[in-house]
Image: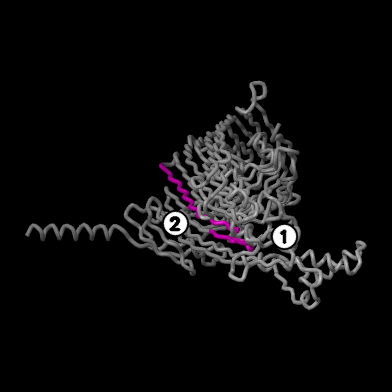
Amino acid sequence: MKKFYLFLLGVLCLSVQAFAQRTVTGTVTDEKGQPLANVSVLVKGTTNGATTKADGTYSVIVPANGKSIMFTSVNMDPVEMVIGNNAQVNVVLKQVDKDMEEVVVTGYQTVRKKDVASAISQISAKEIENMPVANFAQAMQGRAAGVIVAAANGIPGGGLSVIVRGVGSINAGTTPLYVVDGVQLNTSDGSINTQANPLNFLNPNDIESIDVLKDAAAASIYGARAANGVVLVTTKKGRNGKPKFTFDTYVGQSKELKRLEVTNTQQWFQLRQETLINAGATPASALSQALSGIGLPAGTSQGKIDSLPTYDWQDAAFGTGNIFNAEGSVQGGSENLNYYLSASYTKQTAFIKPTDFQRGAMLSKISYKINNKITIDNSINLSTFSQLGPYSTGNTGFGNAAYVASLMHPINPIYNADGTFYGLPGTGQNMIGTYNHNIIAINELVKYFTRTNQLVGNIALTYKITPQLTLRSMVGMDYRNLRDHRYRPSTVNDSYASGGNLSEQVDWNTNLITNTTASYVKTIKENHNINALLGVEYRKDQNQWFQADASGFPSVQLEYLSAASTIVSASGQASASATFSQFGKLGYSYKGKYIFNYTVRRDGSSRFGANNKYGIFNSVQFAWNVKDESFLKNVKAISGLKFRYSYGQASL
């Protein structure tokens, strides 16, 4: 009987709970009465939510403690509706004012695009979505005025030259400062193989926006490191609503742009004779010299010459490159917790084998609102990527198949009858002509491999002291471990005499950064807007590398230092430097029409002596939104007009 009463009590509790919650339905439309799909519907203070259907309808379960419903959608103003006793709640969402809503990252803070008074270009996620590129610098090409992006070589994932508004130094480099989610990247390249690109760690499709600070006035907030401009990258973050899963993939192929027209063996032989005759030789002497040049006796018949084979080195060198990319993500959140998680894999092989690039990357971005004043944000990007580089990187053109293939003598065989390579050292087979190495064999047998493991992450605490005053502290790190493996076996000409050569290098880069900022935003009597920023920052860069060179290997398959008979050299080095900075910014605008900003930063570096340790960088900016004046406000032919003037210093 006791069990029966307990059962009745349990049923009663479940019944009470069932009656305590209810279902609320409704329709979401825009200002024109058109239904809105994919609008996030969330019961405030709970995790209960839904998404509107194609006809704008929704249905959500409201628990007993549910008082209001939040409606949010991209490019629409969010709306909060009190439920009360209503079983149906219909909502009209208004489109946001684009000028008021669009913001850009200007360094340690975001501002309305309308209030920007310096040269800043923004690239949105939609502009670079699903582009078949290895890193985000390639995605910037042609999308920001004054920014020139050029490949240092054709290697997949190879180095890039990024120049913002021209070259500003003769010998100090042109690389801009890259900042990803507040973490300043160390862009030094320690690879001995493939000019490894430190920007390869990030999947371009994880990017929300790229803001390029182009003039000194915009970049001066970053001081001495901003001499070549600043590229600010903001990754995607979660949004309120149920978990949203996405999966994207694409495949592609690449081919050489053009093959050069080359002679066959008989055409080459005829041109060689004509060249010798034009140089003063008799026809008989020219014939004899031409035959000798291809290893044939002077009495070789014309029939024999006509039957000589022709080998197509361009066809052997150039194949078809392949591109594959697959990625998945999940994002969502509630009133207090937002998350974005993604994973991706990319593989790109060049049309000249065995050159390739592979990357696996994961991004985790979480924001947790503890209460109305305190928020914790965390971002972690983990990646591992590898590259197989061509033999010619850092060497002469003799091993560059793209360059030499059209210059190889057409009578030189590529393979022997048994499929082995022709003309390898020690075989007694000699290649004819100036380029007397089998470049196809070199590219297949030589291994230039680079593996990079990288972590870029940060954690930040934001404390809203008052509605106007916000304090934010951030700690971030850019850690990169790079390993180079350069092996040339004894089966290629350059390493035949030494019995094979090996270079191994390991490079560690650690960049630790922390900063604390206080920002103040105040509107006085609706027309006067004041914003102020104060901050301090500490950054420490550490680098350590080790390299060993060896020769003399008993087998081409034993490509390790322990198998070498001779350690040719071994070296290493460790270095570290630190900077400590203070910075501030004061901004004022009147009615959003007249804008003034002043920025100052003081950098102190351990690299310099006591008399030159510190540098101060200032900038002033003025802007006038002419479009907001009464005489232009209603002129539809002009969508926007702004005059601005700025002066700044971003390096000593």
Question: Closest to the observer: 389 or 540?
Answer: 389
Answer with left or right where residue 644 lies relative to residue 47.
Answer: right
Residue under the point 50% across and 57% down: 344
Q: Quadrant of residue 305?
A: bottom right
Label 1 SS: helix
The residue that disc 2 covers is 241
Main secondary-structure element of the magenta-colored stretch? strand
Q: Nearer the viewer, mark 2 or mark 1?
A: 1
Examine the structure image and report whether residue 367 is included in the region drawn in magenta. yes
CA gap between label 2 and label 1 equals: 58 Å
> Could you tell me which secondary element the residue under label 2 belongs to?
strand
In the rendered structure, find residue 51 and report the number of the disc placed on it: none
> Which x, y percent locates residue 626?
74, 47
Whole-percent x, y for residue 3 in the image: 10, 59
Q: Position of residue 40 (x, y in %)?
A: 46, 59
Q: Amino acid at mark 1?
A: Val
Magenta region, residue range = 346-370
Residue 67 visible to the viewer: yes
Q: Is residue 46 left or right of residue 444?
A: left
Q: Nearer the viewer, residue 118 or 33?
A: 118
Indicate the quadrant where residue 154 lies: bottom right
Q: Is residue 598 left or right of residue 87?
A: right
Q: Identify the image quadrant of residue 590.
A: top right
Q: Amino acid at mark 2?
A: Gly
Which quarter of the rendered picture does the N terminus lie within? bottom left
> How many numbered marks are there?
2
Query: In the rendered view, how is the structure colored?
Result: one colour
The numbered mark at residue 404 is 1
Q: Earlier in the sequence, mark 2 or mark 1?
A: 2
Residue at the left extreme of this rendering: 1
